[in-house]
Amino acid sequence: MIKTIKKINNQTWIAILGGTILFLSWIVEKKFESNWINEKQKLERSQLVIDITEVQRANYEVAYNVEAKKEKQDLVVLTFIQVGLCRTYINLLSWSKGRITDDAENYKKIINSKREIDSTNISSYNSGNYEKVHYNFEFVKSFFEKNYLDLDNQFSVKVDEVDAKQNLWNIIFTLLYVLGSLLVGVSFVLEKTSPK
C-alpha cells in the first residue's frame, strides 16, 4: 500500500487535495447553512410575535387615552385597560429580552416576574384594589418606556450579526470552492501537458 502511495504523482495529489477541499467545504457549508436558517427563522418568528403584540399595545393605548381623557372616567374600565396594557408591556419586554439573551436562568427570572406582576394586577383588579393596579401600571409603563427601544435595537444588532456571519462564511466557502476547482483543473492540465 505504501509503494502504491509513493507511485502517485504530484498531479494526482493536487487533484485529490482539490477534490477533498471541494467535498469538505460543501459538507461543512450544508451544516452551517442549516444552523443559519434555523437561527434566522427563530429571529423572524420572534419578530412576528412582537409585531402582533405591538398591535395589541396600540389598541390598548388608544382605549386608555380615550378613557383617561373623559371628563367622567369609569374607574373600573380604566383599571381594566391598565391591566391589559400592563400585560402587553411586560410581554413585549420579556419577549424582547428573550430573543437577545442566551442566559436561560436570567430569562426564567424575567418570565416569573412577568407572571407575578400579571397575577398581582388581576387579583388586585378582582378585589377592587385599583390603586395597586394603577401603581403597577405606572411602574411597568415607565420601565417599558426606558428599556424597550434599547431591547429592540439590541435585536437589530443581533440580526445584523447573524447576517454578517452568514455572509462571511459564504465568502469563505465560495473561495474554498474556487480553490478546490482550481486545484482539480491544474491537476488536469498538468496531467495533459506532462511528458509520459
Image (spheres, helix red, strand yellow):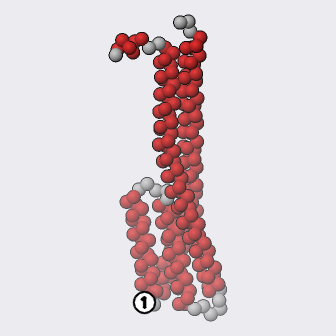
| Residue drawn at x 55%, y 14% as measured from the top left | 191
User: Which residue lies under the disc numbered 1?
Assistant: 127
Q: Amino acid at mark 1?
A: Ser
Binning the other alpha carbons within 10 Å of mark 1 as few (below 14), some (14 to 19) or many (20 upward) gives few
Dot 1: what SS? loop
**As drawn, 29 above or below 70:** above
Q: Residue 108 is drawn in which quadrant?
A: bottom left
| Left or right of residue 175: residue 132 | left
- Looking at the image, which residue is at 58% across and 55% down? 156
- In the rendering, at what x and y percent does residue 100 appear? 49, 56
Give the position of the N terminus as an image quadrant: top left
Q: Residue furthest bottom?
A: 72
Question: In the image, what residue occupies the spot 64% across and 84% down?
Answer: 66
Query: Residue 2's x, y, as percent?
Result: 35, 14
**Residue 138 in sight here:** no
Who's the residue at 58% across and 57% down the image?
A: 153
Q: Looking at the rendering, which quadrant does residue 150 occupy? A: bottom right
Front residue of 99/66: it is 99
Q: Is residue 147 above or below residue 16?
A: below
Name, please, the residue furthest toward the left.
1
| Residue 187 percent location from the top left of the image | 54, 18
Whether residue 81 is visible to the viewer of this picture, yes or no, is yes
